[in-house]
Image (cartoon, rainbow, N blue to C red):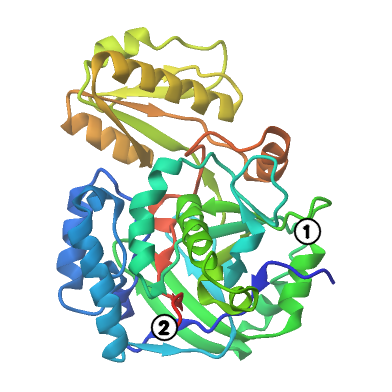
Amino acid sequence: MKKTCVRAAEILLPKTEDLYAWAVIACDQHTSDFRYWEELEKLVGDKPSTLRLTLPEIFLDEGENRISEIVATMREYSEQGVFYKTKPGYVLVERDTPYSPTRFGIVLAVDLEEYSYEIGAKAQIKATEATILERIPPRLRIRRGATIEFPHVMLLYNDAKDVVLKTWKDKRDSLSKLYDTDLNMGGGHIRGYFIPENSDIENAFASIADKDGVIFMVGDGNHSLATAKAAWDEIKAGLSESERQTHPARYALCEAVNVYDSGISFEAIHRIVKGVDPKLFMEGFTQKDRGEAYLVCNGEKYKFSLGEDVASAVEYTDAYISSFIAEHGGSADYIHGEDEIIRITKEMQDSVGILLPKMKKEDLFETVKRHGCLPRKTFSMGESAEKRYYIEGKEIAVK
């Protein structure tokens, strides 16, 4: 079998029994909802938690103070013995949520030398959406000082016959269980099982590579993976070739999920525009002939056509938002969930929501290969509460 980007990893897990406080949702969620993070802050309190090891994007502007606190807490947790390390291997993840059937995934490391977000580049791991280079530097500042990474990256692989995980799912009760816990803030329940390092996993992934050698496409966390790549490119410049082969920063921890898994559903990522005259915004937004979408004002939905091609609808919407803001002012954000759009527009009279159409998950690989990267935030894997919660970590610095 051809060598793949997949690697086993020595995975860091917390010794704490309070995994309910330890595991928190991906940092790119709830970017317009301070109340979510305030409630989570109260829930966590002084307990060990990945909330102290990651930077929610809603606080990204607070910059250096939070970054220095994160780096200091990583060192503090390590010195206090908060973590234990597994032998090299993988974690089979079983996730239940209120919204979808049980989802299975596998936590593994991938070789960043085999990842690219450049359109047309030959790589085993490809980005699905355009990477905004300006979004990398603030994340890179965290990564530069970090000794440990905690991933919310979810990679999708195209495995209609379930070659990679079927056997492991069927015999999961015979595997060592690493964790079994409810997740806070409505995240459902999660279980993790340890799979010792073996060649079967890598060979299975090699067998599902397409004719161009592509194994994975990034489902969630593209900018986080791009940041890990940027950090590695900085580090490797000062290393010998032999040092590059084994440096821990070369390998990023991710969760890989079969796009055909019954627990995976694609949802639209909606837009909210704030600080604008809703009537003026809606009057200037020209409809397409077909396609189903909605504008939302004061909590009320108004049917609106954006065309039948999802990627084109997203691109058209984003272009109008940008031109409107450039002329009239305001700001835009990305929102997961129709209910959240309705809530925000009810509370903020100077806001307009755009409910976008959703892409079919089975179309993803062919669409990306045919058209290149999709417009940013074209789709989301499920509802916000179904996003990956931080549990596992991996060392990325040489001791």
What x and y, as percent, mark residue 140? 38, 57
In primary-sequence order, the first of circles 1 and 2 is 2
Q: Is residue 171 left or right of residue 312?
A: right
Q: Which residue is mark 1?
A: 209
Residue 392 position by quadrant: bottom left
Tell me the SS state at disc 2: strand
- The N terminus - image quarter: bottom right
Q: Is residue 185 left or right of residue 174?
A: left
In depth, the one of 359 and 119 nearer the eye is 119
Residue at 57% across, 54% down: 264
Residue at 37% across, 22% down: 322
What x and y, as percent, mark residue 139? 36, 55
Q: Is residue 206 above or below residue 118?
A: below
Residue 47 position by quadrant: bottom left
In depth, the one of 301 and 159 nearer the eye is 159
Q: Amino acid at mark 1?
A: Ala
Q: Which residue is mark 2?
A: 13
Does any portion of residue 17 appear in the rendered image? no
What x and y, as percent, mark residue 32? 25, 43
Does any portion of residue 290 appear in the rendered image? yes
Residue at 25% across, 79% down: 48
Q: Amino acid at mark 2?
A: Leu
Q: Is residue 328 above or below residue 275?
A: above
**How would you rate the neighbour count of disc 2 (Cα within 10 Å): few for under 14, some for 14-19, many for 20 or more?**
some
**How would you rate the neighbour count of disc 1 (Cα within 10 Å): few for under 14, some for 14-19, many for 20 or more?**
some
Tell me the SS state at disc 1: loop
- The C terminus - image quarter: bottom left
In depth, the one of 382 and 301 nearer the eye is 382
Q: Which mark is residue 224?
A: none
